[in-house]
C-alpha cells in the first residue's frame, strides 16, 4: 500500500444464496480492465472458500484478494443454517468494519471506491466517511428492487385491517412505475405483511433509503427487459446501470464447465426441445409432498427430464419412481445449469424463480414453469408469466400431479411462449454487444471505479 494515489477497491459481499458469485463476476471484469487496482473481496470464510476455492474459479485475476470477515456464529453453535444467518445479520455491521480495518489499518485512505452488495446498506456510511464513491450491486431484478425501494410508500398506500391481506391478495400495486401487474400477494415478506425473519426485513428496510446515496446502483439485468422500472430508477438514483445478463458477459462463467455427473452427455442423447429441466436453486427444496406430486406428474407425462435434486431429497420420491423412469430421467445433485439451459435438448425449465435462474433461462431462450417460494421469487414469477409472457406459474401455487401435467402440456404446445423468450434472448444478446446498453453501462461503471 505504498502508492500515493488511492488504488484499493473494497468489495463487500453478502455470503448467502447466489450473491457472491455474480458480484465476483462483476469485480473480475473490472479487475481485468484495471490491473493496477487491487480489489479486496470481503466475505465470510465459508463463502470465500466456496467462491474462490473451487477449481472453476481458480483463474481469478491476481489483483482480486479474498479476505474473511467473522460470520458472527458462536464457535460451539450447532443449530440450523437459518439461525447461522441470524447471527451473521446481527453482527455484520461491526464484523465488516473490523475485517476491513484488520486488513487496511491506517491505510483506509488508500481506498478508491466501495463495491457492496446492496443488502449491506452500511456500505454507504463507510464510503461517505472516506468521501469515495459507492457502487451498490443488487443481485436480483429491478422489479424486486423497486418494491424494496418503495416499501414505505406501499405501507402508506395500502392500509391493512385486522385480517391482513386476506381477501386483498389480488389487489394491484399499480401506483409504482412498471409494477401495474404485480399483486399484493407477490410482494416479498416484510414489505407489507409476513416476515421471513425480523433481522432480514430490517436490513431490507434500511437498504431502501441508502440507494440514492450510491454513486451507481448496478444489477445483473439488461435495460430492455424492464424499461418503465428503470426509467423511474433513473430519476431516483444518481445512476442506475444494468450490466447483464452476466451469463453472457462473465469472463469465466462460474462452475459452467464442471459436469461431474455427465448431464451434458446425457442431454446429447435426447431430441431437441424435449427435456424438462428442474432446479430450485441453492437455498430451497420443495416439501416432500410436492416433490412426490412433481415426480408423479413427470412420470405420467412421459417426458424426458433432468432434475437437479439434493441427495437427501431423492429418498422422498415415490417408491419405484427412479427405476420406472430410469430410461428417460436423470437425477443429479448438481448440474452445470448455464450449459444445461443452453443445450438444444432442453425445452422447459421448472424453476423457483431465483433471479440468476431467470436470467439464465432468458439468455438460453427457454420458457419456464414457475413455483416460487419466498422473497423476490413471487414477483419474478409474476414478471415471467404476466409481464414478459415467457412462462407459466404452477396451478394453485403448489405442485400437484394434475397441475404439473397441465403446465407441461401447455408449455410444449404453445409456441408463443418460446417465441417471446427467444425475442428477449435476442435483446439480451444485443445489450451485451458492442453498442448495447449493458456494454455502455459497463464503460460508465469502469470510469467511476477506475478513473484517476
Ligand atoms: C437466492 O437464489 P438461489 O441461489 O436459490 O437461486 P438463483 O438466483 O436462481 O441462483 C442459483 C444459481 O445456482 C446455479 C444456477 C444459478 O446461477 O445456474 N445452479 C447450478 O449451476 N446447478 C444447479 O444444479 C443448481 C443451481 C434467493 F433464494 C433468490 O430469491 C434470489 O433471487 C437470488 C439472487 O439474489 O438468491
Image: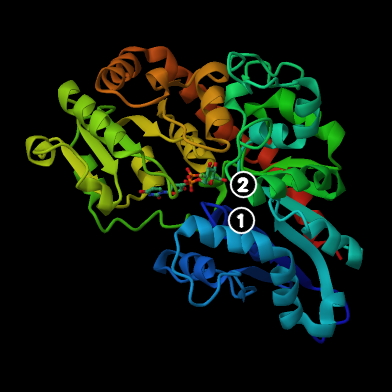
Please tell me how crowded label 2 is: few (under 14), some (14-19), or many (20+) other residues with Cα within 10 Å.
many
- Residue 174: give its label: none
Can you give x and y, in whole percent of width and height, for residue 71 in the image?
Answer: 59, 69
Q: Marks 2/1: CA distance? A: 8 Å
For marks 2 and 1 on the same chain, the one whose residue lies earlier in the sequence: 1
Direction from residue 244 to residue 403 in the image, left or right: left
Where, by quadrant of the figure, is residue 350 drawn?
top left
Look at 80% across and 28% down and name the residue there. 153
Look at 43% across and 50% down and name the residue there. 282
Please tell me how crowded label 1 is: few (under 14), some (14-19), or many (20+) other residues with Cα within 10 Å.
many
Is residue 132 or residue 155 the one in the foreground?
155
**Residue found at the far bottom of this picture:** 2
Is residue 30 or residue 18 the one in the foreground?
18
Read off the residue under disc 1.
23
279 over 52 or under it: above or below? above
Label 2 beta carbon within 8 A of ligand 1 = yes
Direction from residue 156 to residue 227 in the image, left or right: left
Can you give x and y, in whole percent of width and height, for residue 250 in the image?
Answer: 55, 52
Can you give x and y, in whole percent of width and height, for residue 425 in the image?
Answer: 51, 30
231 over 433 or under it: above or below? above
Label 1 beta carbon within 8 A of ligand 1 = no
Can you give x and y, in whole percent of width and height, for residue 189 in the image?
Answer: 60, 36
276 over 38 or under it: above or below? above
Residue 218, visible in the rendered structure: yes
Read off the residue under disc 2.
139
Image quarter in which the C terminus is found: bottom right
Please tell me whether mark 1 sits on a helix, a strand or a loop: helix
Tags 2 and 1 touching, CB below 8 Å: yes
Image quarter in which the N terminus is found: bottom right
Amino acid at each position: 500500500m505504498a502508492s500515493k494515489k488511492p488504488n484499493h477497491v473494497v468489495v463487500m459481499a453478502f455470503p448467502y444464496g447466489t450473491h457472491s458469485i455474480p458480484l465476483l463476476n462483476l469485480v473480475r471484469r473490472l479487475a481485468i480492465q484495471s490491473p493496477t487496482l487491487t480489489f479486496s473481496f470481503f466475505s465470510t470464510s465459508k463463502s470465500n472458500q466456496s467462491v474462490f476455492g473451487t477449481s472453476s474459479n481458480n483463474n481469478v485475476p491476481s489483483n482480486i484478494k479474498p479476505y474473511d470477515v467473522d460470520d458472527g456464529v458462536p464457535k460451539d453453535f450447532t443449530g440450523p443454517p437459518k439461525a447461522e444467518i441470524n447471527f451473521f445479520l446481527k453482527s455484520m455491521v461491526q464484523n465488516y468494519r473490523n475485517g476491513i480495518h484488520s486488513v487496511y489499518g491506517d491505510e483506509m485512505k488508500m481506498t478508491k471506491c466501495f463495491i457492496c452488495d446492496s443488502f449491506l446498506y452500511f456500505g454507504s456510511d463507510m464510503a461517505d466517511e472516506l468521501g469515495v464513491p459507492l457502487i451498490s450491486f443488487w443481485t436480483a431484478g429491478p422489479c424486486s428492487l423497486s418494491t424494496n425501494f418503495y416499501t414505505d410508500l406501499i405501507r402508506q398506500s395500502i392500509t391493512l385491517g385486522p385480517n391482513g391481506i386476506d381477501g386483498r391478495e389480488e389487489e394491484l400495486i399499480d401506483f409504482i412505475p412498471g409494477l401495474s401487474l404485480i399483486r399484493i400477494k407477490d410482494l416479498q415478506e416484510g414489505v407489507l405483511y409476513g416476515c421471513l425473519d425480523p433481522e432480514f426485513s430490517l436490513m431490507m428496510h434500511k437498504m431502501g433509503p441508502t440507494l440514492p446515496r450510491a454513486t451507481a446502483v448496478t444489477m445483473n439485468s439488461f435495460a430492455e427487459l424492464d424499461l418503465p422500472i428503470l426509467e423511474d430508477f433513473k430519476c431516483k438514483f444518481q445512476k442506475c446501470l444494468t450490466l447483464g445478463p452476466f451469463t453472457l458477459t462473465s469472463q469465466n462463467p462460474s462452475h459452467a464447465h464442471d459436469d461431474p455427473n455427465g448431464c451434458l452427455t446425457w442431454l446429447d442423447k435426447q431430441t431437441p426441445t424435449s427435456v424438462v429441466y428442474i432446479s430450485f436453486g441453492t437455498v430451497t427444496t420443495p416439501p416432500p409432498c410436492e416433490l412426490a406430486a412433481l415426480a408423479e406428474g413427470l412420470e405420467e407425462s412421459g417426458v424426458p427430464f433432468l432434475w437437479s435434486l439434493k441427495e437427501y431429497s431423492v429418498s422422498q420420491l415415490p417408491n419405484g419412481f427412479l427405476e420406472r423412469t430410469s430410461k428417460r430421467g436423470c437425477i443429479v445433485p448438481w448440474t452445470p445449469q448455464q450449459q444445461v439451459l443452453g443445450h438444444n435438448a432442453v425445452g422447459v425449465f421448472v424453476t423457483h424463480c431465483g433471479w440468476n435462474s431467470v436470467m439464465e433461462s432468458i439468455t438460453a431462450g427457454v420458457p419456464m414453469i414457475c413455483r416460487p417460494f419466498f422473497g423476490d421469487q413471487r414477483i419474478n414469477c409474476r414478471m415471467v408469466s404476466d409481464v414478459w409472457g415467457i412462462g407459466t406459474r404452477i396451478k394453485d401455487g403448489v405442485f400437484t400431479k394434475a397441475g404439473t401435467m397441465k403446465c407441461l402440456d401447455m408449455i410444449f404446445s404453445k409456441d408463443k411462449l418460446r417465441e417471446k423468450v427467444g425475442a428477449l434472448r435476442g435483446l439480451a444478446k444485443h445489450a451485451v454487444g458492442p453498442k448495447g446498453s449493458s456494454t455502455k453501462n459497463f464503460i460508465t461503471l469502469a470510469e467511476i471505479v477506475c478513473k484517476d
